[in-house]
Amino acid sequence: MQRRLRLIWLTLLLCLIVAGTAQAAAENWTWIASDQKYGKFYAPGHVKVESAINGVATRISAWTKTVYSFGGAQETIANYGIEASIPDPRQLAYSLALVEVHPQTREIEYIQENFYNPDNKVIWSKVYETPRTVKEINSQSFDEDFYVVIVDAVFHHGERDRQQAPDRWITLWQATLPDGSAVNSMADTTTMRLTADNLVFWEWLETKDKAGNVIEVKFMKKALNAAQGSEKIIRGNDWTGAGGWQDMAPSLDGRYTVIPAGSPAEKGLIRLRAFIKGYQFWLNRYRTDSPSGRGTAKNDSSKNTAPQK
């Protein structure tokens, strides 16, 4: 199925390119992923290290391309609030974006975006002013596919492989409550990294009623002090059937809480301690304070010009 989608999107991409540029486009753009709404590509030859500390890249710029189906164009125009500029979704064929990624914090920052019609003419464009909005990459991010291939183009440490791995998510703990509901906690290993004494990661905490229906989901970024056995929620969102997704920020105080001995959560602590011990290379892969062969890159601050459409 994925291979079939890839062929469809590649065919669509070639149809959008004017005569005489097809070969150049094939050289510039590499397919990443596709679904019924979007086709995602990036230009490997235009990935540049903009800054580094101790030889470890801290800012990487790159060009990305997104090809839209009618539904994807509709969704994008609505999300951007640009219906006045692009009233007909059929006129939005694809977009190019200059982005910058920060491996140490798993963040992506959009510098410039250009939207094109089927005739390869710009119909909407924006250069984002500083300070720009920075988006942290997790499993819910549209930009995750772009992020992992750009980071891999510099470090080659397997971000893409870990994103697609069957054991990307590991179960931390499970519990059955007195009312018959069940709670399941899972951690996303792609987001895990060590920062000082903390293991930082995203957790998916799901509660189902006794009939098996999901009644609550908490998606949280956490910091775990494994040595002390304490954790805090940095930020997150809480979902219920009645309220939908809600920001957890109002209920967070930034304090660490001790994980109680004998609690279901202690099983998660034990598993994460084992993960820290066994996956030191992965958890320290982009650290700049004590580099030890995790991947270095030549500092290249030259201007990253746009690849051919």
Image (spheres, rainbow, N blue to C red):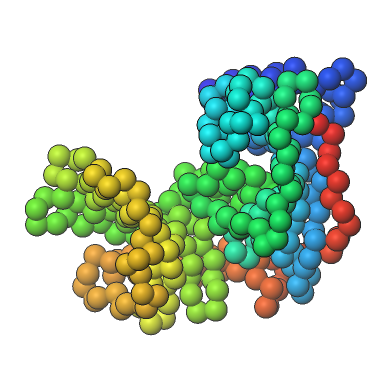
- Tell me how many marks there are: 0
Q: Quadrant of residue 15?
A: top right
Q: Is residue 29 left or right of residue 132?
A: right
Q: Quadrant of residue 50?
A: bottom right
Q: Is residue 35 left or right of residue 167?
A: right
In the orientation shown, which residue stands out farthest toward the bottom? 228
- Nearer-the-camera pick, 63 or 145: 63
Picture residue at 70% right of the left edge, 60% below the top: 130
Image: 31 above or below 54: above
Image: 42 above or below 21: below
Q: Is residue 25 left or right of residue 262?
A: right
Is residue 72 something that shows in the picture? no
Is residue 115 something that shows in the picture? yes
**What percent of the width, then of the height, locates residue 257?**
32, 77
Tell me the quarter of the image containing the C terminus: top right
In the orientation shown, which residue stands out farthest toward the left? 179
- Nearer-the-camera pick, 172 or 45: 45
**What percent of the width, then of the height, locates residue 251?**
32, 67
Picture residue at 86% right of the left edge, 61% below the top: 301
Picture residue at 17% right of the left edge, 45% below the top: 209
**What percent of the width, then of the height, locates residue 2?**
56, 26
**What percent of the width, then of the height, locates residue 52?**
77, 68
Image: 260 above or below 154: below
Q: Is residue 10 left or right of residue 212?
A: right
Picture residue at 69% right of the left edge, 73% below the top: 288
